[in-house]
Image: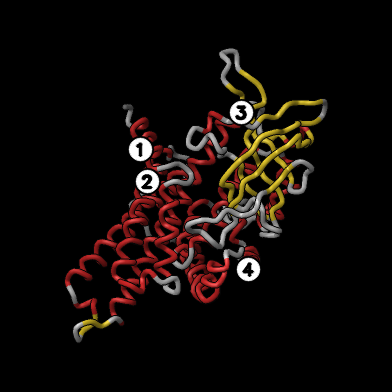
Amino acid sequence: MSLDHRLPDELEELRRTVEAFAHDVVAPKIGDYYERHEFPYEIVRQMGEMGLFGLPFPEEYGGMGGDYLALGIALEELARVDSSVAITLEAGVSLGAMPLYRFGTEEQKRTWLPRLCSGELLSAFGLTEPDGGSDAGATRTTAVRDGDDWVINGSKCFITNSGTDITGLVTVTAVTGRKADGSPLISSIIIPSGTPGFTVAAPYSKVGWNASDTRELSFSDVRVPAANLLGEEGRGYAQFLRILDEGRIAIAALATGLAQGCVDESVAYAKERRAFGRPIAANQAIRFKLADMEMRAHTARLAWRDAASRLVHGEPFKKEAALAKLYSSEIAVDNAREATQIHGGYGFMNEYPVARMWRDAKILEIGEGTSEVQRMLIARELGV
């Protein structure tokens, strides 16, 4: 593999375009959405018009013909300004639309992907359950075959993009039978929004990501056609493991963006804020903090781009994705803490972006595989 990490011209153009959008459109408005705990429909609509939701999908399905590297670049630039907007894109693409593209039938792809790529609709991935957490193999939601239908009962929690006005479908994992040894056969099934018996709860009250949509879902005798099975019956567990491996690259890019945003805000503040007759940037303690923050963000960027490059080139990437997700999420928390400290009392005020970044950072060590799970995966890949 080449060690040249410079972006080709088309990806650099994408980066600059998203950077401008984040600063000119997202930054001036997102704070108000965040404080009101309101989903930013207008911003999401513009992201759809830019083609961001279709970045890694082929043009034949309405996509932009890009790949995971292009998606990661967009996510990093958005997250430098705001993570709620970035996670809406990440979940809509990596968790929502990507399972359809990877495992769907041609009819399922033609039915859903064009509207998902355009941002007209959002989709969600229902995996986590109230008693499951990291133990996704303990799925209790069931789907029973009844003639030409599946009948689904159960619940999911912490599901992003599942209850917006433009959510079109949720793909859920459910137990559809048992193996000879009694272990569950887990399958993935598409449930369109508005299906009778499919109930979407009110939005959670969250610590962060307050301008994104996160809800609990319940299914009471939800009936969908047998054709809504996604991929092979009993392969749902393997499918979501693949989706999570890819999604960790996207989360790593998002976390890198948050970490870099903390640097951006802190450098600007340290140059302007004066104490004892000079800018606080003149103090070695502040300068060393900034240097360490930049070092972390730079290293995280190299890690997620390496994992993305391996994915794009068809090489093994599981370990590299876990490494990138683990490192970038932990340094995002570190940088958010240091940025808040540099800002002092102002860092505790919601009018400053670093306060929002501090609130948004912690979930990155939990979602799409906790830090502990990433360490388990890395150790397993090392053969121990």
Q: Where is residue 281 shown, x and y percent of the image?
A: 23, 76
Tell me what residue is drawn at x 46 percent, y 68 percent.
81
As measured in the structure, the alpha-carbon distance from the residue carrying label 1 to the one carrying label 3 is 25 Å
Point out the tag, 2 or 1, that comes first from the N-terminus. 2
Q: Is residue 92 visible?
A: no
- Front-most of 31 and 150? 31
Q: Which residue is mark 4?
A: 46
Q: Where is residue 184 shown, x and y percent of the image?
A: 59, 23
Tell me what residue is drawn at x 61 percent, y 66 percent.
40
- In the displayed orientation, state which residue is furthest to the right: 147
Q: Secondary structure at mark 3?
A: strand
| Residue 186: mark in rendering | 3
- Position of the C terminus, as image quadrant, is top left
Residue 252, above or below 188: below
Q: Where is residue 225 shown, x and y percent of the image?
A: 79, 35
Residue 347, above or below 140: below
Q: Amino acid at mark 2?
A: Leu
Q: How dense is the environment of label 2, judged by Cα within 10 Å: few (below 14), some, or many (20 and up)?
A: many
